[in-house]
Amino acid sequence: MSKLFSPFVLRQLTLENRVVVSPMCQYSATDGNASDWHLIHLGQLALGGAGLLCVEATAVEAIGRITPSCLGLYSDDNETALRRVLTALRQHSDTPLAIQLAHAGRKASSHTPWDGGKLLAPGAGGWEPIAPSALPFSPSEPPPREMNAADLARVCESFVHATQRADRLGFDAIELHAAHGYLLHTFLSPLSNRRGDRYGGSLENRMRFPLEVFSAVRKAWPEAKPLGMRISASDWIEGGWDLQQSIEFSRRLKALGCDWIDASSGGLAPEQKITLGPGYQVPFAEAIR
């Protein structure tokens, strides 16, 4: 038998095979609430025989959504709407379910991709994004607001609350999103984190907030259930976050109880120069492993 189709164990979760359906943003929610679209989209994927199905990037607070149409798990209404979808899935499939918890940071309050994906002004239905430093994703956009101590505490607690909701919903695993230029990634990269306090500067300081979030989530998530993290292993920009820093970050995560690293890359800034090709991200995963 191919290793791809052999079982894989993560804590007390056994996957029948090693095929994982990655989280895919659908931009089809209303006020963070899952819709009929999610029922159809996830329903067909749950019947495909994959070892694990991961629900799309799901915001832990309203201002953490990429767009106003992104999925959330920050309110009772969000939880109720998602429960409806999961209940239907479980009636017809025993595929284990994961959810990717995320905060978009400075890439929040954006138009949907098919409307250009640019920053959406507060007067047009958007809001003020937050980030480790007041540095915009694109020079043409206004800067986000630099997070203060209250913001740091609130966002960390928001990840915890979303984790508790995910547990009540019966999710089998969680992946935290620290890639693609979203909030936790921007703390890691020296290109987007110019803070002068204990959360900026050195590698140790830049890792601090993402590690605090992971640790808080791990404590709130049942010990029997696996928890992983998606990272951008490289910014693909000179002087940015790179593979060696990713390896050190992964070591620290493992010590805190991280069960997997989802090694992606890029997304921090338009200046990235990605060398595309078949399997171009595999060497990141090989080196981290």
Image: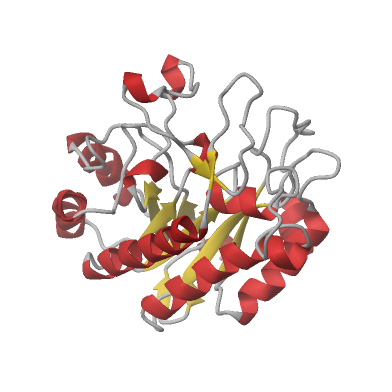
Residue 24, percent across and down? 43, 41
Q: Is residue 208 left or right of residue 107?
A: right
- Does residue 271 lie above or below 246 as drawn? above
Residue 240, percent across and down? 79, 45
- Residue situated in front as seen by the camera: 154 or 240: 154
- Residue situated in front as seen by the camera: 31 or 95: 31
Quarter of the rendering containing residue 256: bottom right
Q: Which quarter of the image is occupied by the C terminus?
A: bottom right
Residue ID at (74%, 47%): 234
- Does residue 287 lie above or below 122 as drawn? below
Q: Is residue 100 left or right of residue 133?
A: left
Residue 228, percent across and down? 52, 66
Q: Which quarter of the image is occupied by the N terminus?
A: bottom right
Quarter of the rendering containing residue 250: bottom right
Residue ID at (67%, 64%): 207
Q: How many marks?
A: 0
Instruction: Name the outermost residue toward the top.
Output: 115
Residue 77, percent across and down? 15, 50
Q: Is residue 142 visible?
A: yes
Q: How was this image coloured?
A: secondary structure
Q: Is residue 289 visible?
A: no
Quarter of the rendering containing residue 95: bottom left
Q: Is residue 37 left or right of residue 178?
A: left
- Residue situated in front as seen by the camera: 41 or 153: 153
- Residue situated in front as seen by the camera: 188 or 34: 188
